[in-house]
Amino acid sequence: MTSFRPAPAWLADAVFYQIYPQSFADSNGDGIGDFAGIAERLDHLTWLGVNTVWLNPCFVSPFRDAGYDVSDYYNTAPRYGSNDALVELVEEAGRRGIRVLLDLVAGHTSDEHPWFRASANDPGDDRYIWTPEADRAGFVASPGTRPGGYLPNFFAFQPALNFGYARQNPAEPWRQPVDADGPRANRAALRSIMDHWLGKGLSGFRVDMAASLVKDDPDRVETARIWTELRHWLDEAHPDAVLLSEWGEPEVSVPAGFHTDFFLQFGGPTDGRALRSLWSNAEGTVNEAWDPLDCFFDASGKGSPHPFVEAWREASAAVAGRGFVSLPTANHDFSRLNCGPRSAEQLPAAFAFQLTWPTLPAIYYGDEIGMRYVPGLPEKEGSVLGPRYNRAGSRTPMQWDEGPNAGFSTAPADRLYLPVDPSPDRPNVAAQLADDTSLLHLVRRLIALRTSSPELGSDGSVEVLNAGYPFVYVRGGRYLVVVNPQLNEAGYEVGEARAATALEVSGVRVDGATITARGFGYGIFDLGDVN
């Protein structure tokens, strides 16, 4: 077992908030969100109670994949502001007790990156993966004087950085081992990039496609070794910084060196079934290859929390003492909670669950007010991944108020990065701030309850009493949580009756040993000191 420095103490209490920077707040009226706009809205995050922000990629890019095609890792994209503006945002957030993480695209660059342009004209450059055969399947024809083709990592314009191959093949001599010069140079480059930004006050990175580095790598063994090497470097050079992985398999990524991994809509042998079994209702972002299943948070009551609970148990056992698992409400690649048939009245139960389960919660911007996935949008910066998979619907502008463009920007509507949700009853921050019965106020209270009650945090124990409708569990032997995300009323007998003081309740009653939960009901109760 590899020994790492313990995760920074602050991470155990993290409440993540993901910001898609081009859609959060526009300060200069050009229709695209920016660093100054985020800085102007930090009071919202402080009031809400989140303490860690993750920004989607904000580096120089041609933006054919919304910034995940990086052409300069050391400078920010002008549309967001300067490097100094990012540093000012980080400092302003720090004064409010909020840490900021950047998105590190580790496995590939843009085909406009100077590294790639040089490699495409130099047969001796091994920074990327090249084959002399221009028509080899899976490779893209060279755009330069170098003959042959390069291996992309996602889209064709995202050439894979060369971290080597786990298995060599004499018939394919371009497969370099992981300790070849090119892979070693790329590992050094990752250290340099991280060191640069951590030195400017950033608190860590969420790593894009973290499992994609070494090719032909069964069980990701060699890729894990790279992250282990980088984690040891990070422990010595920046011991208070963290690495979050887009891997979707915490039982592999955290032992490899990441501090946290997310349950995602993909990853692992079940292709993200744990997260999809909670939220995915076959609307919004849908991969045609996904196995059909009924999600638990659905009015029909056909789903079950069992797939999630079992996946969480396996992952939590593997990461115990070494890191954490994070549970997001959504992300920039996956449908929002408010999607398709799921209505606003169903969202409170989802947050009651997410903010009381022993994972690190990650709130996607706007989910705290119930912003919806907007269907039918045009393709924008590589948003479309399939006939039913348009990510643009989860990337629309933040809805701040009832004014023009929902308060996101003063630009003409036709100049916005994406159109604002056209629904006449779209939620907004200002209206929900004025209504203490709103989802926004509930999320704030749930975060405050979690923050003030260690038993409800990431390290508190959980005892599942009923993995069905209603979902019933006890945190830390003290807090009873009841969640009924279906339309119909449901009940459960807990056995021995205990006094239960209501802390945050809607539609749930505890009468002795009997729990009754109305449709879409939720409840958090204090059972008293277990001692």
Image (cartoon, helix red, strand yellow):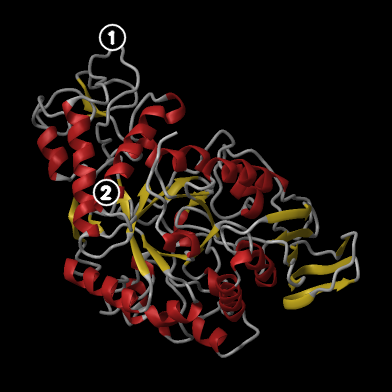
Whether residue 117 is situated above or below residue 283 in the rendered picture? above
Q: How far from the left and from the top, in percent, is residue 504?
A: 70, 77
Which quadrant, please, contains the C terminus? bottom right
Q: How far from the left and from the top, in percent, is residue 239?
A: 31, 54
Nearest the camera: 109 or 394?
109
Give the secondary structure at mark 1.
loop
Tell me the distance, in whole angstroms, between the alpha carbons under discs 1 and 2.
Answer: 41 Å
Q: Inspect the image, locate mark 2, and give the three-letter code of the amino acid beneath it.
A: Glu
- Tell me if residue 266 can be seen: no
Whether residue 275 is situated above or below residue 526 in the rendered picture? above
Q: Which mark is residue 399?
A: none
Who comes first in sequence, dot 1 or dot 2?
A: 1
The quarter holding residue 135 reads: top left
Residue bearing mark 1: 171
User: Mark 1: few, some, or many residues within 10 Å (few <14, many ≥20)?
Assistant: few
Residue appearing at x 46%, y 27% in the figure = 219
Residue appearing at x 22%, y 70% in the figure = 87
- Tell me if residue 504 can be seen: yes
Residue 89 as seen in the image, left or right of residue 450: left
Residue 140 as seen in the image, left or right of residue 143: right
Residue 282 as seen in the image, left or right of residue 253: right
The label nearer to you, 1 versus 2, is 2
Q: Inspect the image, locate mark 1, and give the three-letter code of the amino acid beneath it.
A: Ala
The count of marks equals: 2
Residue appearing at x 41%, y 66% in the figure = 52
Q: How far from the left and from the top, in percent, is residue 37?
A: 31, 77
Q: How far from the left and from the top, in percent, is residue 283?
A: 61, 54
Q: Which mark is residue 236?
A: 2
